[in-house]
């Protein structure tokens, strides 16, 4: 019987950079996903988009919605729907915490990245609060100021 070498490490498939711009990230969680075979193959090919993704609570379970995993090109008639709802796998305590925090209002669950960890597809989700327009401008200004100060320090060291 042949043994198959197990994957090690972490391979990022997709990131949601816009989430860091639009939301104030308060807490992150790692969750497994219930996927079909063609979804896994499509993810292994490095194809996914988290831009419109969000998570909802239904019947005490967390569901990932709006995430686009394109159909597998070599798939047959049993290919998956690209934007179907996918169940997330979390501990009961984590689910309870997410349910409580989202019921308080003003907070939502957004996906930050999809990756493979030791061969298993995982999604990093975050408990986030929406930023106002002036908060976004303030964040951009702070990043720009930090960049300028680093540039000034590096030019000073060169002399």
Image (cartoon, rainbow, N blue to C red):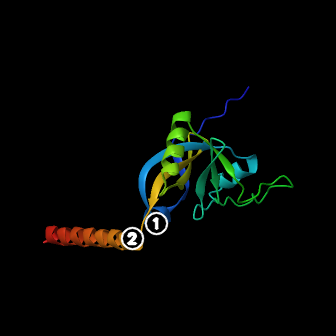
Q: Is residue 8 visible?
A: no
Q: Residue at x 72, y 56 (%)?
A: 84
Answer with left or right where residue 110 lies relative to residue 131.
right
Which residue is situated farthest in the top direction here?
1
Q: Is residue 14 above or below residue 4?
A: below
Task: Residue 134: name its quadrant.
Answer: bottom left
- 1 or 2: tag closer to the N-terminus: 1
Q: Residue at x 23, y 67 (%)?
A: 150
Q: Residue at x 36, y 69 (%)?
A: 135
Mark seen at residue 22: 1
| Foreground of the two, 5 or 25 | 25
Instruction: Find residue 68 and report its horizontal and vertical position in percent.
Output: 66, 61
Mark seen at residue 32: none
Instruction: Find residue 105 and report its horizontal and vertical position in percent.
Output: 49, 55
| Foreground of the two, 1 or 89 | 89
Q: Residue at x 74, y 46 (%)?
A: 37
SS of the residue under disc 2: helix
Which residue is situated farthest in the right direction here?
77
Instruction: Find residue 139 and report its horizontal and vertical position in percent.
Output: 34, 68
Quarter of the figure that contains the C terminus: bottom left
In contact (CB < 8 Å): disc 1 and disc 2: yes
Instruction: Find residue 66 and report its horizontal and vertical position in percent.
Output: 65, 60
Q: Callout 1: few (<14), some (14-19), or many (20+) C-alpha neighbours within 10 Å?
A: some
Which residue is situated farthest in the left direction here?
159
Instruction: Identify the residue under disc 2.
Output: 136
């Amino acid at each position: 019987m042949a043994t198959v070498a197990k994957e090690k490490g972490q391979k990022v498939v997709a990131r949601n950079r816009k989430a860091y711009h639009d939301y104030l990230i308060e807490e992150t969680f790692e969750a497994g996903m219930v996927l079909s075979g063609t979804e896994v193959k499509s993810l292994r090919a490095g194809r996914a988009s988290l831009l419109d993704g969000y998570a909802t609570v239904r019947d005490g379970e967390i569901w990932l919605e709006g995430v686009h995993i394109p159909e597998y090109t070599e798939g047959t008639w049993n290919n998956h729907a690209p934007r179907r709802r996918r169940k997330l796998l979390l501990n009961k305590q984590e689910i309870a915490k997410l349910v409580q925090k989202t019921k308080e209002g003003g907070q939502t669950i957004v996906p930050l990245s999809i990756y493979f960890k030791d061969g298993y597809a995982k999604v990093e989700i975050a408990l986030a609060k929406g930023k106002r327009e002036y908060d976004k401008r303030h964040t951009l200004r702070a990043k720009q100021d930090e960049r300028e100060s680093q540039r000034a320090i590096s030019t000073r060291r060169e002399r």
